[in-house]
Amino acid sequence: MAAAHSIFSPEADDTRHPLLHKLLSRPYPAVMGVLNVTPDSFSDGGQFIALDRALAQARRMIAEGADIIDIGAESTRPYGSQPVSSDEEMRRLEPVLAAVAALGTPVSIDSMKSQVVTWAFENGAAIANDVWGLQRDPDMASVIAAHDAPVIVMHNRDKPDATLDIMCDIAAFFERSLEIAAKAGIPASHIVLDPGIGFGKTQEQSMIALARLDELRTFGFPVLVGASRKRFIDTVVPSEPKERLGGSLAAHLIAARGGAQIIRTHDVADTVQALRVAHAIEARR
């Protein structure tokens, strides 16, 4: 796995949003811990709906080294998830969001609805994480611009198409998203790109996106990757979601080598350890 240069080196730019500058100024990727307050998420649905369990999980991830807590109240898994209304999404978030934000670690709101994102910003969220890359809700970009907040712009499709060159599709999608962001007044310094591993892709395409992640560097934006427990791991080694730690770590180390500067994971302690040990080894080349 030799490389011409170490990818465990900061590319932070002091013109970026202060929160992103802080996250990206270290010599290894920042880690985003997943907190789902949903009954039907693919890996941990129903585990953290109650406030005491959600807070305990958030505290545990922070103690393990999470730099961001990503809270979502609507499952976006590709198969079997049920859409919920904005009111229901906010009802699920209401007991949890402000309490987790009060712990002091930045919180991102994982939602595709501008009404929910507005409410979340008003209740402690610092980052928007839009799985439809500003392209599904026409008000999303203007809401994010109005709050002067960072945004994670993720690639997505309504359904996979195995005939696509997935990297070309991701690039075209990001070009549209960046145009929307610019028109709304979101500064380039506030944007993070996410190739959307497992979203609108075949399992093969998810692996291709990870293998060719370095192609996204041409956009000049920091990249987030969330491959944690994703289904493509099962196609290589048959396994249930909670049995995919090894595959998740492998994917995330390869993503870091390809330029990812933020890693989204369910397994914070193991991911932090893997990234930091990899950095320590790389530093001794």
Image (spheres, helix red, strand yellow):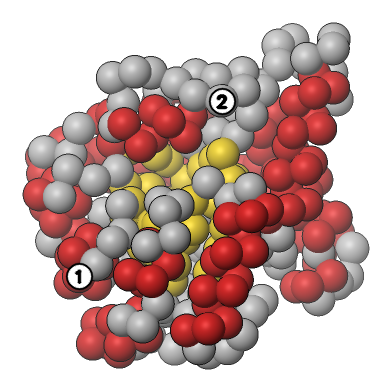
As drawn, the residue found furthest toward the right would be 237
Q: Which residue lies at the image location 66% right of the left edge and 33% below the top edge?
A: 256
* Residue 39 x, y percent position in the rendering: 53, 89
Q: Taking 149 as reference, is 4 above or below it?
A: above
Q: Which residue lies at the image location 17% right of the left edge and 43% below the top edge?
A: 148
Label 2 packing within 10 angstroms: few (<14), some (14-19), many (20+): some
Q: Where on the picture, by quarter, is residue 221?
A: top left
The answer to whether residue 91 is visible is yes
* Residue 281 x, y percent position in the rendering: 85, 22
Q: Where on the picture, by quarter, is residue 26?
A: top right
Amino acid at pointer 2: Arg
The one of 200 and 124 positioned closer to us in this rendering: 124
- Which label's residue is closer to the chain start, 2 or 1? 2
Q: Which residue lies at the image location 73% right of the left edge and 37% below the top edge?
A: 275
Is the N terminus in the top left, top right, bottom left or bottom right quadrant? top right
Judged from the image, the secondary structure of the residue bearing numbered disc 2 is: loop
Q: Which residue lies at the image location 61% right of the left edge and 85% below the top edge?
A: 47
Mark 2, residue position = 26
Q: CA distance from mark 2 to mark 1?
A: 31 Å
Q: Taking 180 as reference, is 35 above or below it?
A: below
